[in-house]
Amino acid sequence: MVIALLTDFGDYYPGVMKGVIRKITQDEVIDLTHSIHPQNVIEGAFLLHSAYGYFPAGTIFISVVDPGVGGDRAAIAIKTENYWFVCPDNGIAFPSAVEDGITEIFRIKESVSQISGALSATFHGRDIFALAGALIREGRMEHLERFNGELVSLDLFDARVEDGLIVGRVVHIDRFGNAVTNITRDLIEEHSISGFTYMGHEIPLVEKYEDVERGKPLAIIGSFNTLELSLREDNFSRHFNVGFGNIELGWR
Amino acid sequence: MVIALLTDFGDYYPGVMKGVIRKITQDEVIDLTHSIHPQNVIEGAFLLHSAYGYFPAGTIFISVVDPGVGGDRAAIAIKTENYWFVCPDNGIAFPSAVEDGITEIFRIKESVSQISGALSATFHGRDIFALAGALIREGRMEHLERFNGELVSLDLFDARVEDGLIVGRVVHIDRFGNAVTNITRDLIEEHSISGFTYMGHEIPLVEKYEDVERGKPLAIIGSFNTLELSLREDNFSRHFNVGFGNIELGWR
Amino acid sequence: MVIALLTDFGDYYPGVMKGVIRKITQDEVIDLTHSIHPQNVIEGAFLLHSAYGYFPAGTIFISVVDPGVGGDRAAIAIKTENYWFVCPDNGIAFPSAVEDGITEIFRIKESVSQISGALSATFHGRDIFALAGALIREGRMEHLERFNGELVSLDLFDARVEDGLIVGRVVHIDRFGNAVTNITRDLIEEHSISGFTYMGHEIPLVEKYEDVERGKPLAIIGSFNTLELSLREDNFSRHFNVGFGNIELGWR
């Protein structure tokens, strides 16, 4: 069985979480990612949604992008048909959990933090979520109670086609500078789109990187099954100064 | 049982260390961190001290921040009440080992490097420390000898209050740009401090991030149980151009 | 047994690969590195070549630096005397495999991608290589066929001495800013070289970092058994603006 971690913590904080987990369970811990852009819940939700199905059934995903840490947001554990999602209630696991089929929702009691000491104001990844995830693996539910509210929802795939424009969102920028959008393959195929314009540049929709020359822009349905904007063997995001958030593309 | 790695090596070098370890022992290897600021022994000591207690008893910490590699500094293995610390003798494990209670100190003989080949001048993480840690796990002590000198010491918590000023040290800057200091909760409570001034800015001491507006500075007792300076949902260290080393804060 | 990953993927993509692998095999997965400079096949080949021998016999190296993804390059699995190398056929594993002794070469059929879904155009690390490596571990060869072509070759150690110059290549820049070259110890000893000149600076060849003052440049035979250019406790690559590729050094 596997516990998978997805956070915006970078290095070190996840290492401490692994120590906390290992005190409770021998379950394997896999780092899914710790490079979510700080506090970017949407990117976290998108990357989790794109990844969870590749993990074995029974995997517990501890997903902590948590700008509200220390405040009123609930800490929750969602049981779905095949997985567990342990996270703050800010939408990060919502699209994944809904897709896989929610079966039970729990609130994690702050009392769980007493197992390893005090509750800090800033690092519930260590003091709440790692502990809760590890305990769930061991079948220990004493720090969970039924969650009776409504989950914070999050709609990842809200891109839309307007006259001459696709309005979507850049939801991930990877190490290669590819700007990954939430514009789905279905939306593109529905409108028989064959190319885009962006900032005055023609960007062809291609099947593979080699369909354009090195250094040229291209659009491709990438590994997330959504539209990505790339420069072949170069960094699209840097060259076009593209960041997270809304993006409008012309299309033909 | 666990072997935990803490280095300033970034990526790749730790991967080689894991290969070296795996040739000797099946013990699990956990990356605590490899992002210590290059050659910053104080940061390494601080992060190790804040983390080790969260790991299971018996964990062997291989801690390599080693500006003196290839020179005269000793390679040591410290046995404490609950853990092992394998490291260069430059203070990196000193605060942790003293706190946990030192029971025995060994010098690691360079002969250990013959197990995997030659001794390089630059990468004792691979040629000395990974090997020594893995062998200790297997109960093989033939490359250890009693260490009879005095350990290089390191005092992490030397912050002090002067008239109107706290003089401390930034000992860690995390991915969020939080400037983590060595100013302890005890010191702050002893002087009933309620806020700070820094570079002409008023910085309130708060209980949680949400106590200030987005983008505003705040001071908080963070997960290290010391003072951290933050910008809510933004990067304090970058905006205030704060780096490692001494810091002086006004207080009230 | 171990599966080791070497890629230029940074974070997240490797996490997904680990999920894919874990669905098929319980074999341990070790991250060798995911920080290869994007699309830099030569750096990947160099780092793999320098590391593989430190891993236990039987290790399967999944090595994916793959600028030709989605194009015509073959996906291959090379069995050598002691290891397996699973990678695109672009030379990345060539020096390692030849050195260890190739015993069999296979082409990986695209049909393997059906195990976890569709074949994306951009992420064969997930859709081909992770699956193939995990299946090989389980002894399942049904998606392999004999490779009858000639492997793409890659010559790492082609540095040469001309009159007054050594012409080599910077093949890796590490986190400390050390510029690691492909100029071998043998080449340096053969010409009894004792120092270098670069951009008007005298750079002594030393035995250890402490042989020069802090902040001063030095040349050293590093842990790759090749020449590295460093600034003591500082960043050579940044200060001298040195990147990957050819480098010419004066020598004496």
Image (cartoon, coloured by chain):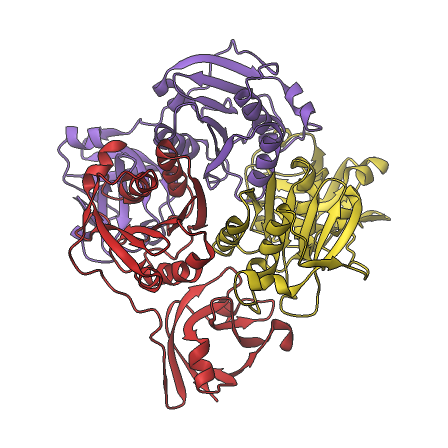
Chain colours: A purple, B yellow, C red
Give the quarter of the figure containing the N terminus of chain B: top right
What residue sits 57% from the left and 36% below the top? Answer: A18
The one of B86 and A100 positioned closer to us in this rendering: B86
- State the image coordinates of residue B121 (x, y, percent, origin top left): 57, 69
The one of C247 and A140 positioned closer to us in this rendering: A140
- State the image coordinates of residue B251 (x, y, percent, origin top left): 79, 43
What residue sits 37% from the left and 54% below the top? Answer: C82
Q: Is residue A241 left or right of residue C234?
A: left
Give the quarter of the figure containing the C terminus of chain B: top right
Residue B123 seen anywhere in this rendered image of the structure = no
- State the image coordinates of residue B208 (x, y, percent, origin top left): 65, 30
Q: Is residue C123 left or right of residue A112?
A: left
Q: Is B131 located above or below residue C25 in the figure?
A: below
Q: Is A124 located above or below residue B51 in the figure?
A: above
The one of B136 and B97 positioned closer to us in this rendering: B136
Q: How many marks?
A: 0
In the figure, residue C180 lies in which quadrant? bottom left
